[in-house]
Amino acid sequence: MDRIRADLPVEGEPFEIVYEDLWRDIAPYTMHNIHPRHWGWVNGSGVPVAVLGDMLATGLNANCALFNQMPNHVEIQVVNWLTEMLGMPSGSGGLLVSGGSMANLNALHAARCAKAGYDVRKLGTGHGPRLTVYTSDETHSSVQKGLEMMGLGSDSLVVIPTDENFRLDVAAAARRIAEDRAAGLRPIAIVANAGTVNTGAVDPLNAIADLCEAEDLWMHIDGAFGALAWLDPRQRERLAGMPRADSIACDGHKWLYQPYSLGCLLVKNPELLRNAFELTPSYLTRTPGSVADAPLPYGQYGIELSRPFRALKLWMSLRVHGVNAFSQAIARNIDQAGYLARKVDEHPDLERVAPVELNVVCFRYSGAEAKRLNDINIDLLAELQKRGVATPSLTFIKGAAAIRVAITNHRSRTEDFDMLVDASAAIGAELAG
Ligand SMILES: *Cc1c(COP(=O)(O)O)cnc(C)c1O
């Protein structure tokens, strides 16, 4: 840190020196999520073709705001491919955004414009009854953050407890919606999970879609990583109902192994995005036949106006590797989660603390008295990282400190998980004394 804190450079210095400093002072101290044993939070690993794509997109300096020509066509193509990859109905569309948080925020604003029952864009949030959104207690914090930013307040997020498998209790949600309507509130949406961040749980999507239809609610799916499990045909049953959603958030920078950043908001009816975001001042007038004659004015479909050419890296990756390569990599990550879960289950001093649905395994060292286990596992997580064994992350599952392994890494091999299990047991024993 001391090396980076420096006085403002008034005069320039040779590029070689700056470049050397990068490799000496910065590159060795990243989160290393390009390493085969990085499984923390949900970080993508990054494929080389996409790295090149990003470099070229930056070099072209394309601004995909409103009027770009071929770059916007590339984004349209990539969004179409994504809707096809996720089994969404034809006519679906959407746009690329910075990540899952932004996709959730854009979707929630579109949902409220569609379902509030009054002109939210004109009248704001003070008008009419409180708008409410329903979701499980395992939903990502970005959903609450989004509602807070929208001025709805966190009280508008009605959090429904999950069942023993960390899935939304749909009957409880239905009861709560009825109660809230009776109390004069206006339910507008359900946010369902396709892959919760803690355990990878998938909510009962078909039942949620039925409830949304019956109650005239917007169905948004936070599938930041899990939606892409659709590419593994074995997961289609678990994810059944996903194509019925009004909107899906999914991140290329997670389970499509793209470098940061690449999020995506996909919607069944793109006009509803336009209704929520279109605004055309005089200085953004479209002039047919000129440079300002765009195939799709993306700035009218979301919050961002100036936007990087995010589509290029994924367009190049899909063309060079083919979608099958991605499907296979995702299926392999899911198999690796199953393998790790079995190794943990077989080990006398390790235990799993949540079911494994997709690519997330939560476990802990369990070879000591119950009251010491949280402290031991918090230390164990730190030791695994400090000793360079692996980078899982920490979470708490029903109060139990857990080593959380989220596998969105195309570089991981079977041996990497053997190493994690062996080291966790050994270091856990060491810490337990
Ligand atoms: C990562 C994640 C998010 C947030 O996405 P960002 O790209 O980090 O903004 C939201 N929901 C889930 C389930 C996630 O895993």
Image (cartoon, helix red, strand yellow):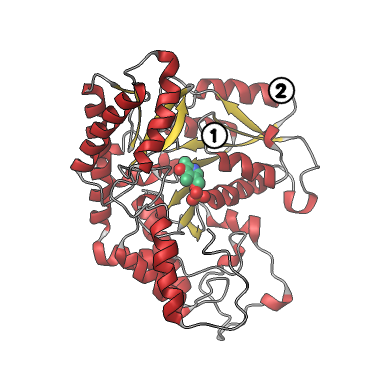
User: Mark 2 is on which residue type?
Assistant: Ala
Q: Earlier in the sequence, mark 1 or mark 2?
A: 2
Q: Nearer the viewer, residue 367 or 118?
A: 367
> Assess mark 2: CB under 8 A from ligand 1?
no
Q: Is residue 305 above or below residue 425?
A: below
User: Mark 1 is on which residue type?
Assistant: Cys
Please state the horizontal and vertical placement of residue 383, each as a whole percent of the image. 37, 37
Is 318 on the left or on the right of 248, as rendered?
left
> In terms of image quadrants, where is residue 422?
top left
Q: Nearer the viewer, residue 20 or 84?
A: 20
Q: Are marks 1 and 2 in contact (CB under 8 Å)?
A: no
Residue 361 in view (yes/no): yes
State how many labels appear: 2
Q: Quadrant of the C terminus?
A: top left
Q: Residues within 10 Å of mark 2 (few under 14, many from 20)?
A: few
Please state the horizontal and vertical placement of residue 305, each as a whole percent of the image. 61, 67
> In terms of image quadrants, where is residue 344?
top left
Taking the spot 69% from the left edge, 65% from the top edge, the residue there is 279
Q: Is residue 98 above or below residue 184?
A: below
Please state the horizontal and vertical placement of residue 337, each as a whole percent of the image. 28, 36
Taking the spot 32% from the left edge, 38% from the top edge, the residue there is 359
Q: Nearer the viewer, residue 386 or 139?
A: 386
Residue under circle 2? 182
Q: CA distance from mark 1 to mark 2?
A: 17 Å
Q: Residue furthest left?
A: 415
Q: Residues within 10 Å of mark 1 (few under 14, many from 20)?
A: many
Residue under circle 1? 212
Q: Which mark is residue 308?
A: none
Q: Nearer the viewer, residue 111 or 318?
A: 318
